[in-house]
Image (cartoon, rainbow, N blue to C red):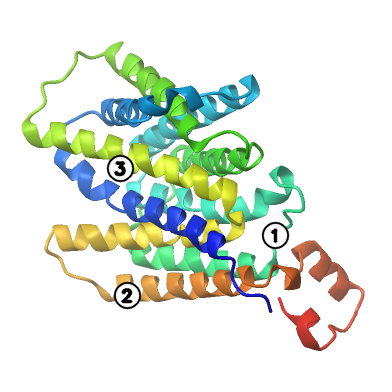
Amino acid sequence: MSSRNPSSSFYLMAAAGAILIWSTLAVSVTFCNTLNPMFITGAALSVGGIIGLPWLRFWKMPKRLLAVGTACMLGYHVIYFYALQLADPIGVSLIHYLWPILIVLLGPLFVQNGNASLRCLLAGVAGFVGALVSCRPGQLDDLSNLAGYGLAFLSAVVWAAYSLTSKRFPEVKSASVGLFCMISGLACLTLYLSSAPWPTLNTNESLALLYMGVGPMGGAFYLWDFAMKKADHQTVAVLSYATPVLSTAFLAFYLGQGMEVSIWIGAALVALSMAMAAGGSTAPQNHQSTSAWFKRYSKGTTVPSGSDAQL
């Protein structure tokens, strides 16, 4: 078994940074609960684009990437926003967090030799169960608003496609994400201002919007793009299931509610999924694609002993 490449660990640290920053978004939004979500999204994404202006010379990319990247960035936020409006937010969040496992499943369509390994698929399932438990699904309403849940699933597909698209353009600098943020942010603000005036912001709201633009809706996107381009997309996807668990924990502490048992169980399952994914990424030569695995077993082939039997 080969040792982990030091540079790979560095790239995964970028992903972990993005995940940690994203986990603070829910707490940040509590400071803006009187503002329209479309305005929050537009303002924060615009700030996210502004922080990339010092690297403007790197905002160079093929026209196809510009079109797809901007459409996905804008479409993801607008679709997710409307999903939250149409259905129960907890249910929407759970369905939305199918995107990490969708990254694993859709990988072969975007990445050359990107077959999903059985180990990462199982890790993804464990991570999703951990996210589901930590978000306390017992609070879900009935399925009367299927349109909202359908949009939540669509937003998960869009984000997975956006994440994998970046991996197809490794030569494009991650600083170019600023262009996606800028165009998407201005588009959201335009949509909002077409039906409402610019709101009056207090100090807390202004600081919260500034933080969101620098952090979870700006800087985190740069880190995420860098990680997706450089690291194994399956491992990065599984790590992402820490986001809802950490987000729930941060909210619990902020609201003074303490850590419930469900959060600890969810955290344990996510930690298990991370260990499974990390164990697989240290020995990529031992990975089997899921298609090859099922093909062998459908023919009644016995798995040989030794390293070839590893999942």
Q: Residue at x 36, y 27 (%)?
A: 54
User: What percent of the width, then of the height, locates residue 100?
Assistant: 53, 54
Query: Does residue 23 appear in the picture of this structure?
Result: yes
Tag 1 near tag 2, CB within 8 Å: no
Does any portion of residue 135 appear in the rendered image? no
Q: Specify the amino acid type for callout 1.
A: Ala
Residue occupied by mark 1: 116
Disc 3 packing (10 Å; few <14; some 14–19; many ≥20): many
Q: Nearer the viewer, mark 1 or mark 2?
A: 1
Tag 3 or tag 2, which sits nearer the N-term? 3
Asked if residue 63 is positioned above or below residue 55 in the image, the reply reads above
How far apart marks 1 and 3 lie (CA) works out to: 31 Å
The residue that appears at 18% across and 44% down in the rendered structure is: 30
Contact between labelled residues 3 and 1, with CB atoms less than 8 Å apart: no
Q: Judge from the rendering whether residue 257 lies leftward or rightward of residue 282; answer left or right.
A: left
**Number of residues whose C-alpha sits closer than 10 Å to that of mark 1, classed few (under 14), some (14–19) or many (20 or more):** many
Place of residue 173 in the rendered image (x, y in percent of width and height, measured from the top left):
53, 35
* Image disc number at residue 215: 3
Q: Is residue 47 above or below residue 222?
A: above
Residue at position x 34%, y 30% in the image:
45
Q: Amino acid at mark 2?
A: Trp
Residue 6 x/y as whole percent: 54, 65
Q: Which disc number belongs to residue 264? A: 2
Q: Quadrant of the N terminus?
A: bottom right
Mark 1 or 3, closer to the camera: 3
Element assignment for label 2: helix
Q: Please tell me which of labels 1 and 2 falls first in the chain.
A: 1
Q: Quadrant of the C terminus?
A: bottom right
Q: Secondary structure at mark 3?
A: helix
Query: Real-space Cα distance between discs 2 and 3?
Result: 26 Å
User: Measured along the vertical axis of the image, is residue 166 above or below residue 290?
Assistant: above
